[in-house]
Amino acid sequence: MDTNKMALICKTLSDVNRLEIVKMLVNGEKCACKLLEKFAITQPTLSHHMKILEECELVCEHKDGKWRYYSLNKETLFEFKNEIEKMI
């Protein structure tokens, strides 16, 4: 993983809401409606956060009808974890 991608992931996770979303997804795939229940934010704001998480490849999305489901991209997370471990 290059330094720019690592910096992008760090920047993405520096937002409290995005970090909480990632923590919620550790337990498995969630519908956007379930994520929204946890936060005092609007649906457009959640969509904005999810777009940022998808752009840095931390989260994957799939649609089922009108619903969107999100899950962690474990490959990116493992790669990020390995790079962090190299620094320790």
Image: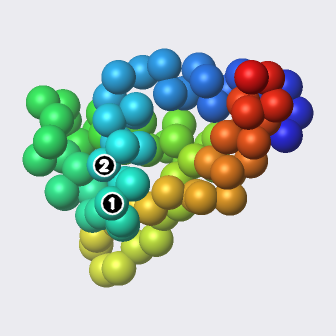
The image position of residue 72, as x and y in percent, is 50, 57
Name the residue carrying label 1.
27
The image position of residue 30, as x and y in percent, is 30, 63
Q: Could you tell me if residue 5 is visible in this image? A: no
User: Looking at the rendered structure, which numbered label has been put on residue 24?
Assistant: 2
**Residue lying farthest to the bottom in this orientation:** 65
Q: Name the image quarter holding residue 23.
A: top left
Compared with residue 75, is residue 35 higher up or lower down, i.e. above or below? above
Q: Is residue 26 left or right of residue 66?
A: right
Q: Name the image quarter holding residue 70.
A: bottom left
Q: Residue at 31% x, 80% y: name it.
A: 65
Three-letter amino acid code at the position of disc 1: Asn
Q: Secondary structure at mark 2?
A: helix
Q: Is residue 17 left or right of residue 59?
A: left
Q: Residue at 41% x, 73% y: name it.
A: 63
Q: Secondary structure at mark 1?
A: loop
Q: Dot 2: within a 10 Å radius of its alpha carbon, few (fewer than 14), some, or many (20 or more) residues? A: some
Q: Residue at 14% x, 42% y: name it.
A: 38
The mark total stands at 2
Q: Nearer the viewer, residue 3 or 41?
A: 3
Q: Gap between marks 1 and 2, in whole Å?
A: 6 Å
**Residue lying farthest to the right in this orientation:** 2
Give the position of the C terminus as an image quadrant. top right
The image position of residue 64, as x and y in percent, is 35, 79
Q: Could you tell me if residue 71 is visible in this image? A: yes
Q: Name the image quarter holding residue 11.
A: top right
Three-letter amino acid code at the position of disc 2: Met
Q: Are marks 1 and 2 in contact (CB under 8 Å)?
A: yes
